[in-house]
Amino acid sequence: MLIVLRDIADEVLERAESIVNTEKNVRDAVESGMHPLAAYR
């Protein structure tokens, strides 16, 4: 469970979505044969 202050909830959600998107892009690139470090950059 995570408690997020209402005042920063939008920012926290945006950052979390950004992280998830980055992880998905890296995972897709690695599955396509790219080296993990190259995919992250």
Image (cartoon, rainbow, N blue to C red):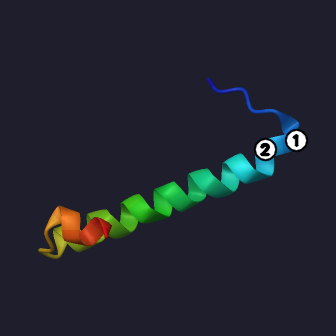
Q: Residue at x 17, y 76 (%)?
A: 32
Mark 1 closeness class: few <14, some 14–19, many ≥20 residues within 10 Å: few
Residue 37: % across, % down: 20, 63
Q: In this view, does 37 lie to the left or right of 25?
A: left
Kindly identify the residue that appears in the image at 88 percent across and 41 percent down: 7
From the viewer's perspective, is residue 2 above or below residue 28?
Answer: above
Q: Quadrant of residue 35?
A: bottom left
Q: Residue at x 65, y 27 (%)?
A: 2
What residue is shown at x 58% (from left), y 51% (from top)?
16
Q: In the image, what residue type sits under mark 1?
A: Asp
Query: In 3D space, how far apart are the residues under numbered discs 2 and 1 (Cα atoms)?
Result: 6 Å
Dot 2 falls on a residue whose secondary structure is: helix
Q: Splitting the image into 4 quarters, where does residue 8 fall?
A: top right
Task: Classify mark 1: helix, strand or loop.
Answer: helix
Q: Left or right: where does residue 32 sit relative to residue 1?
A: left
Q: Do the residues labelled 2 and 1 touch (CB within 8 Å)?
A: yes
Whether 39 is drawn above or below 13: the answer is below
Question: Given the current orientation, which residue lies at the most extreme top position?
Answer: 1
Say which of 40 and 24 sits in front.
40
In the rendered image, which residue does mark 2 sit on? 9
> In the picture provided, is 28 more to the left or to the right than 31?
right
Comparing 29 with 36, the one in front is: 36
Q: Find disc 1 in the rendering and name its residue.
A: 7
